[in-house]
């Protein structure tokens, strides 16, 4: 017969304490992330006098004076458009290079496979400031300096390790037997990939694209070093609003955070689905 008696009191107390610590840790982590974002938008949507005054507001007054002044600031619109172009191009380049590499790592055995995986990760081991001067010299010689394409190439290299590792885990979680079944039904390898593997891996590929977008959108060092006339919004804010009034800094910060939040929220279902595919 199985013992159906309740666990001893010390075990119950330990479980309750562990559950309490877990939920308390989750709550603190959520507050750590959301409270700064909340106060950023509260100050961005409040009157300039309320931003610099005390006590601080908990709810915004929805005064758009700071936002309107920020949007009318010379160069902001062009910098915003440059950020969008660079981020979209970074997404395309990182997926175009990362997805085939992830598929090859998951499906083929070849000499140097493990070294290649380590080499992909090692691309993030070198700090970007160390590579700034060689990159600037190379870009000047090749005509890529101060261009959207040149900056997108740098951002794509920053996002490429994430794209390779994410797609590798996704393709590894899709049984190869599905492709083999498609081969027996008359598909070649490319047709089997497009008709069978790609629809299953699409959520993860979209999630990888989200990471590439966010990395490009938030990157500031390469954008500040490699561009002058075609600066992205982060580099423009670093240059123009460093000594600006506090309300304009909050408005600029909100302008940087809002597109990334909207983009992630729009593709959240792909992010959630990615973990289910990768953990199969």
Image (cartoon, rainbow, N blue to C red):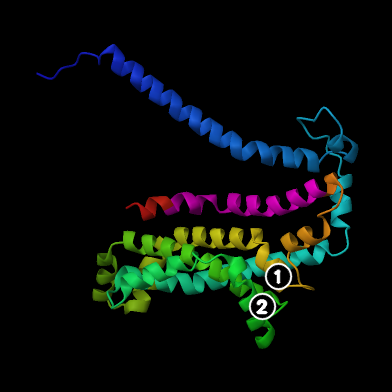
Q: Give the magenta part as a residue range.
A: 249-274
Residue 80 appears at what percent x and percent y? 76, 63
Q: Can you say whether 39 is above or below 67 in the image? A: above
Q: Look at the image and tell me in which quarter the N terminus lies.
A: top left
Residue 212 appears at what percent x and percent y? 56, 63
Residue 16, labelled with which disc? Answer: none
Q: Which quarter of the figure has residue 133?
A: bottom right
- Is residue 264 inside the magenta stretch? yes
- Is residue 124 inside the magenta stretch? no
Q: Are marks 1 and 2 in contact (CB under 8 Å)?
A: yes
Q: Residues within 10 Å of mark 2 (few under 14, many from 20)?
A: some
Q: Which quarter of the figure has residue 103?
A: bottom left
Residue 186 appears at what percent x and percent y? 28, 78
Residue 86 lies left or right of residue 47; in this view the side is left
Q: Can you say whether 233 is above or below 261 in the image? A: below
Residue 134 appears at what percent x and percent y? 61, 78
Residue 136, labelled with which disc? Answer: 2
Q: Main secondary structure of the magenta part?
A: helix
Helix, strand or loop for disc 1: helix
Question: Disc 1 to disc 2, how far (Cα)?
Answer: 8 Å
The residue under the point 52% across, 67% down is 126
Helix, strand or loop for disc 2: helix
The residue under the point 31% across, 76% down is 112
Q: Can residue 251 be seen in the rendering of this structure?
A: yes
Q: Which quarter of the figure has residue 44?
A: top right
The residue under the point 75% across, 66% down is 81
Residue 225, labelled with which disc? Answer: 1
Q: Earlier in the sequence, mark 1 or mark 2?
A: 2
Residue 224 lies left or right of residue 34; in this view the side is right
Q: Can residue 102 be seen in the rendering of this structure?
A: no
The front one of 273 and 137 is 137
């Amino acid at each position: 017969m199985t013992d159906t008696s309740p666990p001893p009191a010390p075990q119950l107390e330990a479980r309750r304490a562990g559950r309490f610590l877990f939920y308390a840790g989750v709550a603190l982590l959520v507050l750590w992330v959301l409270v700064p974002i909340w106060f950023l938008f509260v100050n961005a949507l409040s009157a300039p006098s309320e931003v610099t005054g005390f006590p601080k507001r908990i709810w915004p007054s929805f005064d758009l004076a700071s936002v309107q002044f920020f949007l009318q600031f010379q160069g902001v619109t062009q910098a915003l458009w440059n950020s969008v172009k660079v981020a979209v191009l970074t997404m395309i380049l990182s997926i175009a290079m990362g997805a085939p590499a992830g598929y090859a790592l998951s499906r083929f055995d070849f000499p140097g496979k493990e070294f290649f995986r380590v080499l992909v990760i090692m691309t993030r081991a070198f700090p970007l400031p160390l590579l700034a001067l060689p990159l600037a010299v190379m870009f000047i010689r090749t005509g890529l300096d101060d261009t959207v394409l040149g900056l997108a190439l740098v951002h794509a290299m920053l996002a490429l390790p994430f794209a390779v590792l994410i797609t590798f885990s996704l393709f590894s979680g899709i049984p190869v037997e599905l492709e083999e079944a498609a081969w027996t039904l008359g598909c070649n390898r490319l047709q089997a990939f497009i008709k069978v593997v790609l629809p299953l891996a699409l959520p993860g590929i979209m999630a990888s694209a989200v990471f590439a977008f966010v990395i490009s959108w938030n990157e500031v060092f390469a954008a500040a070093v490699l561009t002058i006339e075609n600066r992205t919004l982060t580099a423009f804010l670093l240059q123009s609003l460093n000594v600006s009034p506090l309300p304009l800094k909050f408005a600029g910060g909100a302008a940087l955070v809002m597109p990334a939040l909207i983009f992630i929220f729009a593709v959240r279902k792909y992010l959630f689905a990615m973990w289910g595919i990768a953990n199969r």
